[in-house]
Amino acid sequence: MVGVYVSNSSRKEHHYQEMAEAGEIRERPTEVVVHKVEAPPLRTSLSKMKLRLKETFFPDDPFRCFEGQPLKTKWALAAKYLFPILGWAPNYSLSLFKSDFISGLTIANSSFVPPLVYAVLGSSRDLAVGPVSIASLIMGSMLRQAVNPSADPLLFLQLAFTSTFFAGLFQASLGIFRFLVQSDPVGFMAGAAIIVSLQQLKSLLGIVHFTKQMGLVPVMSSIFHKTNEWSWQTVLMGSAFGVPPAG
């Protein structure tokens, strides 16, 4: 395995320019130098798998900065690692605060209007409107499989509070130990999109008696076992609104 590159020395460059100006040569000769390139070292499949797992779960190697540091520095780095504000707050300026203030107002207005509209037009006082609503739907579907909220509402609420408590502990541990990687929110959003899309099939097909579970198998089973409730009118209407306009 070899590598090739082309080079011209400065001394010959001046000589070639003089000869070109005198019309003695038309094309500049080039010197080709061949260098040997060593092949990368061979690694076993186990070492490759370890490297990929390390890049997946610890892409930035957060403990590298602790190596060879005195004890006080390690404590300071650990505090900055757990509380990143200690790292960027000393360099925070007034211009950055103005930009953050404008961005905060923009996001606050865009997040405040939908709940306000739903408070006026909504039919449920307990529905959460926001990006966490899909998590509430999944939890409600999971708890209904264990407890009937109409028969035992107190136990249902206790299980909901317990589940949210442990979910909060789990999410806090992900943030503290930096176990959350880019693929996690991407997977969550993809799963949420699939669940929402499956639930919309009920309205698209016009099914009245639809399952309350949110899993893929129960939803698809309910769809194909209720073919007698399919309505071509709703399918046509939903498909017409789902097609993007031409141009």
Image: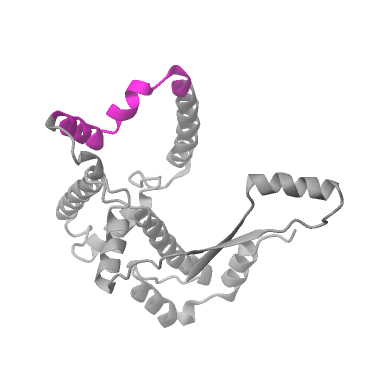
Q: Residue at 28% of width from left, 48% of height from top?
A: 61
Q: Residue 78 occupies which quadrant of the picture?
A: top left
State the residue lying farthest toward the right.
23
| Residue 123 image position (x, y, % from top left) | 41, 47
Q: Residue at 64% of width from left, 52% of height from top?
A: 8
Q: Nearer the viewer, residue 232 or 60?
A: 60
Q: How is the image coloured?
A: one colour
Q: Nearer the viewer, residue 222 or 184?
A: 184
In the image, the segment drawn in magenta is 72-97
- Magenta-drawn stretch contains 89: yes
| Residue 105 image position (x, y, % from top left) | 47, 28
Q: Residue 6 occupies which quadrant of the picture?
A: bottom right
| Residue 31 image position (x, y, % from top left) | 64, 59
Q: Residue at 35% of width from left, 43% of height from top?
A: 125
| Residue 225 image position (x, y, % from top left) | 41, 82
With 90 as the anchor, is 193 left or right in this view?
A: right
State the residue lying farthest toward the top.
94
